[in-house]
Image (cartoon, rainbow, N blue to C red):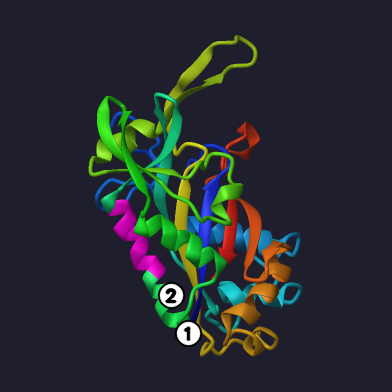
Amino acid sequence: MKGLLVLAYAVTNLHPGAGRGYGVVDLPVQKDQLGYPIIFSSAFKGPLKALCAGEAVNGSGRINCKEKPECCCLFGSEPEEAESNKGVLNVLDLLLFSVPAPIRNGFVQLTTRYLIERARNIFNVIKDINGYTGTLGNDISLLLDKKGDGEVAEIYNSEIETLNLDGFKILNSLPLFNSKLAVSDDRRLIDRSLIVYTRNRLNLLTKVVNEGGLWSEEYIPMGSIFIGGFVIDESVSNKYCEVTSKVACDSLRFLPYFSKVFNANKISDDVYSLYLNIGGKESIGKGFMKVFVGV
């Protein structure tokens, strides 16, 4: 097995929905077992498959494997295929690492020790199976190790340790990342950074809200940072993988192939980027992420 690291940045507010909730918010975002936002692998894999397939979609809304065999190699065969084939690309959850939060003289990226250690699990897996880290891995390592000059800042009326980090190559390109990381133990501070929209559905003739047409949606704010990964299983026997099997044994050889399949932009020899829509809502300008993939 080999692996690729993923660092994702919310270009706009995100709504990876969890379905109808029973709390204050009608439509909350996906949460892990401790109540922290997360983008589950299925919500990440779906947009990747759609981007890979492009217009090669059959009448059932599934990938046409004859037109795009590389997609069915990466993600597995579709249900209507006579022979079932597992994909070589295992998609991991996108774990929230930090959210932007206001301070007196600007903003910081706010995280908690739990979010740091949750992300470290993924990072260590990819690092261990590859045996090395590259440009993206070094950036993520700097975040996780949180070594820098510290000061105390007030965030939502709480005094929080804030670190000034440096040495980033990829993260420094992000508009809402300024190398300041605040580390707390209070999940409620993360909750306060989430956004709740109240939406309505109007009758276009009467301009009055339809019955049942008022609801609330929860969003993860733009500027939030996520960490995830892909595990490449070169041992998978898949009839669509004639080309992929030749490069799946090495992460650095697999990256250019990955970039070609997804029409990704080359950032450096070991980092590529692409844009995805996560959770829908693109018609109202929500759900866009910039995704960096590398080692």
> Nearer the viewer's eye, disc 2 or disc 1?
2
Residue corresponding to mark 2: 127
Residue at (38, 33) in percent of width and height: 193
Q: Which mark is residue 242?
A: none
Label 1, secondary structure: give it.
loop
Residue at (53, 39) in percent of width and height: 176
Give the image quarter of residue 49: bottom right
Label 2, secondary structure: give it.
helix
Instruction: Determine whether, in the image, residue 41 is placed left or right of residue 74.
Output: left
Query: Start and end of the magenta stretch?
Result: 114-123
Give the image quarter of residue 158: top left
Q: Nearer the viewer, residue 294 or 163?
A: 163
Indicate yes or no whether the magenta region holds residue 48. no
Q: Mark 1 packing: few (<14 Cα in 10 Å), some, or many (20+)?
A: some
Task: Where is residue 203? Give x, y as percent.
Answer: 59, 17
- In the rendered image, is residue 22 in sight? no
Indicate yes or no whether the magenta region holds residue 121. yes
- In the rendered image, is residue 236 in sight? yes
Q: Nearer the viewer, residue 3 or 211?
A: 3
Residue corresponding to mark 1: 1
The kind of secondary structure the magenta stretch mainly shows is: helix
